[in-house]
Amino acid sequence: MQGNTMRHVRRIYQATSQHWVGDGFLVQPLFSHMGEDKQTDPFLMLDYAAPMEFAPNTAHPHGVGQHPHKGFETVTIAYHGEVAHRDSTGGGGVIKEGDVQWMTAGAGIIHEEFHSEAFSQRGGLFEMVQLWVNLPAKDKNTPARYQHLAKENIPVVTLPNEAGYIRVIAGAYEDARGRAHSFTEMNVWDIVLHANAAASLQLPEHHNLSMVVLRGDVTFNGTQTAHAGELVGFVTEAGTIELQAGSEEVKILLLSGVPIDEPVVGYGPFVMNTQQEIRQAINDFNAGRFGAIE
């Protein structure tokens, strides 16, 4: 511990737009490698599909059809509703409420994501996050793969004074280690704070650190308050962060990690280090080298 040294909030960002991905995901981009640098490295992009009611649908499920990715990983966290996934590695299945899908595009993958048949038919509340995680240059051509993290296999740690709990998706909190395998050092945690509860967190000082507030109002270090749908960026420094929930339960997605600190060149679904590598990715995709969904 660093005594009472605080890790300071650098800035609080609001989503400034929203758009549909296919016809199943109405998302608010909170950061992107194609826009302002919000010091989120190694995380490239985050789209938040805020809670939304879908009517029962007996036609083809809503979603987004086949599309490629290369050079990074996609992480899908289903908070409400279900997503059915298929990809060109043969991976697939239903991402149920509370589950996480960690897909390594690596050398190239084709996938599709739709509301599951069961969710489509019954309708209901839908909420999810899709996060893009960068790969270092040495790993950008790693074989594509798929990790399914079922809700029941994600470690949950109760916070002191029963203030709430942390779900450790990747990285570690106290003695709990997340099941997700990542290529660089990072933490991806869901944090729930009960109404009016307080907690203290300390993350490695060499990690970039951001928190996405998904529900409720939370005050950091007694001074700055963030609301649902906002991104909180922290100074990269040593220190403790004090969290104080408002009058309702708070839900936060915490992202911390060692910056990769390499050039990022993005073109649609491809993220590489140079324009030449982007051209090669396009050629590989057009030549069918990403495989096909059977």
Image: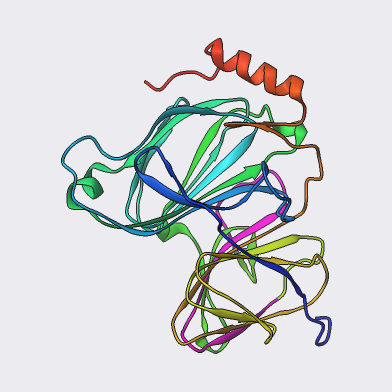
Q: Is residue 244 magenta?
A: no
Front-most of 27 and 86?
Answer: 27
Q: Quadrant of residue 260?
A: top right
Q: Position of residue 9 (x, y in %)?
A: 73, 73
Choose between 154 and 230: the one closer to the eye: 230
Q: Residue furthest front?
A: 16
Image quadrant holding the C terminus, namely top left
Q: Is residue 4 left or right of residue 81?
A: right
Q: Is residue 171 above or below residue 32?
A: below
What's the residue at 65%, 29% (across, down)? Answer: 142
The quadrant where residue 222 appears: bottom right
Residue 110 position within the rendered picture, expressed as x and y whole percent measured from the top left: 48, 26
Q: Was residue 185 drawn as part of the magenta stretch in this picture?
A: yes
Residue at left offset 79%, top offset 67%: 235
Picture coordinates of residue 16 (x, y %)? Answer: 56, 56
- Does residue 79 sit above or below 146 in this rendering? below
Give the extent of the magenta segment: 177-201
Q: Is residue 279 above or below residue 265?
A: above
